[in-house]
Image: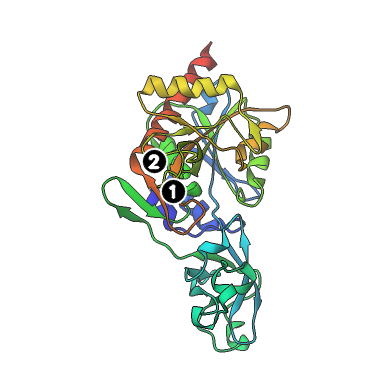
Amino acid sequence: MLAELSNLYGVSGNETAVRKYLEEKTSGKGLDCYSDTMGNFFVRKGQANSTRKVMLSAHIDEIGLMVTAVEKGGLLKFKPVGGIDSRILVAKRVVIGSQTLPGVIGAKPIHLQKEGEQKKPFEEDSLFIDAGFKSRDEAEKFVSPGDFVAFDSRFTVLGKGYCRGKAFDNRAGCSILLELLLEDNGLAFDAAFTVQEEVGTRGAFVAAFRLKPQVALVIETTTAADTPETEIEATVTALGSGPAISFMDRSIMVSKGLREQLVEAAKAAGVPYQFRRFTGAATDGGVISLTREGVKTGIVAVPCRYIHSPHSVLRESDLEATKTLVRSWLRLQGKKGKE
């Protein structure tokens, strides 16, 4: 399912294809499924029999681009949707609009650059999308400002136990949440597949307000910088070390009790775990924790190299261990609901 989810196009604000996939997978499985006006997709599993309302969340959107102008020569100008390092954009393949027209991100060729230009990374404004149009008039028959642009990258298995693809942030979390929903595991929770996380955690705010959970867990993907010449303290997480449990991030302080529950659940399930050594980014956990009178919220994430790029890499054992940890944590919540 990660392969199928990764290959779908779902830039923030345009997540329809991902939501339809989730609807198809959960339809006819005896689950209570519905959407809201924001585009969030909800699935209730066994919650009617539970006295403790638990919310699991994973965002379905991905970073991408948006067309802002069509130049007279038929080239397209764009702006990023979500946090993208402009240094990764040059020569990347993309698809444009609802027709998924193929294109490539171009820039001034190196033999025309001045010496000073060659020593600096391309700035966003100097880049453009080339979709093979010879004029503005021709381009405007197929493309308009406001069209979404996604990276054209396909899921690939690497070596033994690794995989590469786009949108692992956060289709990895979505695949875990979807598998937990489809399992015959006797668990009770509300699943929220949220939209527009990459542009301000907008969908999660609306979703949590609607569900009114007592406790929530965000299933995410996080940076793994375990590459050569990186000090261990700066790696954030490492592939192969299991799911990453957050102390805090830019949007939330995770309660000590909930963090300890996640550690307890990992130990009970016999899976490795690590702590996320970075606090600069925000997650859906921030807005969920501040909803209504407040919600105890935890965050667990799959480590991922080259995050927010067209070619992220993760380890399958970490994906499986994260699912096992979340399942174990849910069983703890079920026990608490009976106390």
Tell me whether circle 2 and circle 1 mark residues in contact (CB < 8 Å): yes
Decide if residue 67 is in sight here.
Answer: no
> Counting residues from the N terminus, which is met first, the one under dot 2 or under dot 1?
2
Q: CA distance from mark 2 to mark 1?
A: 8 Å
Left or right: 184 as drawn, with respect to 256: left
Quarter location, residue 41: top right
Please, what secondary structure does the residue beneath circle 2 have? loop
User: Which labelled disc corresponds to residue 36?
Assistant: none
Taking 81 as reference, is 39 above or below it? above
Residue at the image position 50 percent from the left and 47 percent from the top: 170
Q: Position of residue 176 (x, y in %)?
A: 43, 39
- Mark 1 is surrounded, within 10 Å at the Cα level, by few (under 14), some (14 to 19) or many (20 or more) other residues, namely many
Quarter location, residue 28: top left
Q: Position of residue 211 (x, y in %)?
A: 63, 34
Residue at the image position 62 percent from the left and 88 percent from the top: 137
Left or right: 286 as drawn, with respect to 52: right
Q: Residue furthest top?
A: 339
Residue at the image position 40 percent from the left and 47 percent from the top: 228
Mark 2 lies on residue = 239
Depth check: give the residue in front, 121 or 136: 121
Mark 1 lies on residue = 305
Taking 242 as reference, is 167 above or below it? below
